[in-house]
Image (spheres, rainbow, N blue to C red):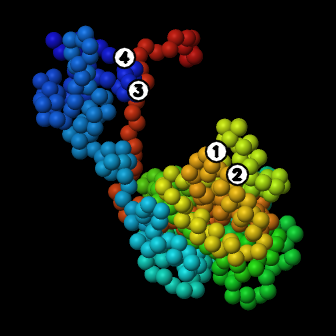
Amino acid sequence: MYGVHMTDHGAAAGGTERLTTREAAERLGVKPATLYAYVSRGQLTSHREPGGRGSTFDGREVDALARRGRREPPAGGEAGGRIRTGITLIDRDRYYFRGVDATELARRHHYEEIADWLWTGTLTPGTRFTAPPEALAAARRAMAALPRGSGSADRLRAAVIAAAITDPVRFDLGRDAVLGSARMLIPTLVDALPEAVGRPGAPEPGDDRERLIAFRLWPRLTAEDPDEASLAALDMALALLIDHDLAASTLAVRVAASTRAHPYAVVSAGLGALDGPLHGAASGLAHRMLAEVLERGGAGPVVADHLRAGRRVPGLGHGLYPGRDPRAEALFTVLERIPSARAALEAAREVEAVAARQTELNANVDLALAVLSAASGMKPEAGETIFAVARTAGWIAHALEEYGERSLRLRVSGHYTGRRPPVPPPSGTDPRP
């Protein structure tokens, strides 16, 4: 007799759902004899419970076989849940944009040049992005209307929405239209941000550096005037952070793009995911830690406090790199040329050295960003702003790629772990008359 040995769903080792023979056969829409034929062919595995009179089956295996039979894509839309992309490759301790070493690109070219090349395949020296007056005015009004104390992430989200409304062709997902929107959106986000309090004034008219996003972003981050090395460090940080494969915010962007949301909407999706403390805001935690190290005169007590409280030390380690984060190493190299960054850089190196006594974690790009912001008189949230502006270019690249794929392909199937129906409705008074 088949299926008489019932199991407790979700109670198996590791939380795996076990199905009886009858349940597995019903889920596949086959007879029990066919089910055991699948076992004999190696398409399913069965397990006979001690003392039981029937076999049980792994619910995940059964669901996977059912999907193959219906020719449905597995979770993630592609084999193994992976998303095809030709934008960024992370390989051991290096990462590459379209096959080119990303750190070498950042050393040789400006942020906007790399961004445009990533979108088009053509690298044009002197590339300039310009904010349309109407979009810029709308973005500034939206930022100004936010409550007092709003952060840069709040301002950027408001600016994206306002800029979108001024673009009547935002729903055109053709490549040229999307590129036009991208080249307008990034400078709009930067130029709409208010300048830091205490800025001495606008740069001299005709300054050729005005074409650089880094030059225009700098006065929004700090009241200090940049020297050439500091400006180069900000430009490199933007370039290094353009993309990093399918980070959480980029995955959110691809899901939005798969629904055929317009480019402003996909950037909004990315900004929403970036707002988490474990993603874009991570450099702010590292900034505050470095400030404390400098105040207390050493990294030992600060690292000890983090570990005593059960907190990870900010700015250390990255799950994708077994060794050093190449973005941090490239940015540290530039920061070493800035005299004013020496103290913050030494503090970062000391944090890394102290933590290394117990762990093998190395500095990541969040710690390098924290050195840049702490050494330049920027607020702790400056790193998050740099990250968001930089990554907007990568999000657009992923949106362009996703627009060329089958729509809604990223519809993931849930693995239901609740009670099996039919379940009686909850008791209580019926609110209807």
The quadrant where residue 68 appears: top left
Residues under numbered marks 2 and 3 in contact, where contact means CB atoms less than 8 Å apart: no
Q: Is residue 268 left or right of residue 220?
A: left
Asked if residue 271 is positioned above or below residue 375 in the image, the reply reads above
Q: Residue at x 25, y 10 (%)?
A: 51
**Disc 4 or disc 2, which is closer to the eye?**
2
Q: Which mark is residue 276?
A: none
**Disc 3 or disc 4, which is closer to the eye?**
3
Q: Secondary structure at mark 2?
A: helix
Location of mark 2 (residue): 285
Q: Secondary structure at mark 3?
A: helix
Q: Which mark is residue 8?
A: 4
Please rate how many residues cluster around mark 1, counting C-alpha atoms within 10 Å: few if below 14, some from 14 to 19, many from 20. Answer: few
Nearer the observer, 233 or 127: 233
Location of mark 1 (residue): 312
The quadrant where residue 142 appears: bottom right
Q: CA distance from mark 2 to mark 3?
A: 35 Å
Q: Residue at x 67, y 52 (%)?
A: 354
Quarter of the image that includes the C terminus: top right
Disc nearer the start of the sequence (1/2)? 2
Question: Three-letter amino acid code at disc 4?
Answer: Asp
Asked if residue 278 is positioned above or below residue 183 in the image, the reply reads above
Residues under numbered marks 1 and 2 in contact, where contact means CB atoms less than 8 Å apart: no
Disc nearer the start of the sequence (2/3)? 3
Q: Which mark is residue 15?
A: 3
Nearer the observer, 158 or 16: 16
Q: Is residue 32 left or right of residue 379?
A: left
The quadrant where residue 343 appears: bottom right
